[in-house]
Image (tube, rainbow, N blue to C red):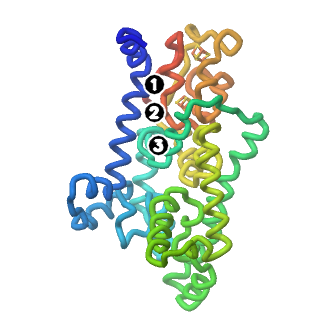
């Protein structure tokens, strides 16, 4: 590839290039242990500050009970505290920025994008299969809410029941998102498990329970699958995606399709082919499309549209 074609390729992929840069910076900032390692700094004194910014609630933090805002919302509920501030923050961010966080910031999204960058033929699921699988993440969230609501209510009204019920929930009662969140797994559980393996000099921590073992292979399989099925975890399993898709449907920030410029699926259809979330963009109204809130605002469709038919709009 000569310099001219390289420059033209960079120009054509300007959005992706900027997104990659933002993703790398976000990955390092969110996992500030990396900054400590790279620059030999001690950022532990920032713990108090980082705890009030949920997105920066880093894995390094020994007193962290979650790696993201939803993790912290659920954790507050089981502690009997209604997380009004966090819920309001989450709703406002989604209303004003749609799922920009998912496409540009989330470190789990970045990991899957790295996998998807492996040059392979990307696969698409049958529409019916895809639509059925989309429901899994909603089931996870409903299940979590049903299980933790009694804790939220009884923490202040019936403490004996609360203690009993929480003890019966085991690990789930300590950290409700623990098993359902890949970020919780990768950034909290997994490093601790590796540390235990090093300390004990054995693989025993991996086999400490049947569930631990199953979840390990399940998440490994998901990460490998994202080489062929981009953002497979976001699409079907991420609880944050479930919650945010419901709210982002009403976001002020949207993508629209110009009816004059767009030539449609038969003539083109490139936007749908490049969409990592397998969204049927062309089945949606011209005024705006969100894929039922599944769009993570990566802007790949906009970047690749040869007719410049996709626009961002606010309001
Ligand atoms: S890539 Fe652009 S022109 Fe082609 S179908 Fe999609 S929106 Fe229409
Ligand atoms: S619809 Fe466009 S912006 Fe949304 S996820 Fe698909 S490619 Fe990305």
In-image side of 8 versus 238 (left or right)? left
> Do residues under tags 1 and 3 come within 8 Å of each other at their CB atoms?
no
Checking the image for residue 3, the label placed there is: none
Q: Which residue is mark 3?
A: 110
Q: Which residue is rendered at x = 25% and y = 66% of the image? A: 44
* First of labels 2, 3 by sequence position: 3
Q: Position of residue 64 (x, y in %)?
A: 39, 69
Which residue is under mark 2?
253
Are dots 2 and 1 in contact, CB under 8 Å? yes
Residue at the (52%, 37%) spot, across then down: 296
Q: Quadrant of residue 230?
A: top right
Q: CA distance from mark 1 to mark 3?
A: 22 Å
For image coordinates 50% across by 21% down, the residue present is 302
> Which residue position is annotated with label 1?
312
| Quarter of the view holding residue 260 | top right
Left or right of 164 on screen, residue 27 = left
Q: Position of residue 232 (x, y in %)?
A: 62, 44
Which residue sits at x=35%, y=52%? 30
Of the 4 image quadrants, the one containing the N terminus is top left
């Amino acid at each position: 590839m000569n310099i001219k074609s390289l420059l033209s390729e960079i120009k054509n992929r300007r959005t992706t290039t900027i997104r990659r840069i933002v993703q790398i910076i976000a990955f390092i900032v969110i996992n500030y242990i990396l900054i400590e390692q790279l620059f030999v700094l001690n950022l532990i004194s920032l713990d108090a500050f980082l705890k009030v910014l949920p997105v920066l609630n880093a894995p390094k933090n020994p007193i962290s009970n979650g790696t993201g805002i939803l993790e912290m919302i659920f954790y507050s509920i089981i502690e009997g505290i209604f997380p009004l501030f966090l819920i309001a923050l989450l709703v406002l961010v989604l209303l004003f920025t749609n799922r920009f966080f998912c496409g540009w910031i989330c470190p789990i999204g970045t990991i899957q994008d790295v996998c998807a960058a492996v040059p392979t033929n990307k696969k698409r699921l049958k529409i019916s299969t895809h639509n059925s699988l989309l429901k899994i993440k909603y089931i996870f969230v409903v299940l979590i809410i049903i299980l933790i609501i009694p804790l939220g209510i009884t923490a202040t009204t019936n403490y004996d029941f609360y203690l009993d019920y929480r003890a019966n929930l085991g690990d789930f009662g300590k950290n409700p998102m623990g098993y359902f969140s890949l970020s919780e797994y990768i950034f909290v559980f997994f490093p601790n498990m590796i540390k235990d393996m090093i300390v004990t000099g054995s693989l025993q921590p991996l086999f400490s329970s049947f569930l631990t073992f199953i979840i390990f292979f399940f998440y490994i399989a998901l990460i490998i699958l994202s080489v062929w099925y981009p953002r497979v975890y976001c699409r079907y399993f991420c609880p944050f995606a479930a919650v945010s898709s419901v709210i982002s449907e009403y976001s002020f920030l949207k993508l629209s399709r110009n009816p004059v410029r767009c030539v449609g699926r038969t003539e083109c259809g490139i936007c749908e082919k490049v969409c990592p979330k397998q969204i049927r963009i062309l089945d949606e109204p011209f005024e705006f499309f969100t894929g039922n809130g599944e769009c993570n605002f990566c802007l790949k469709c906009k970047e690749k549209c040869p007719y410049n038919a996709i626009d961002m709009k606010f309001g």
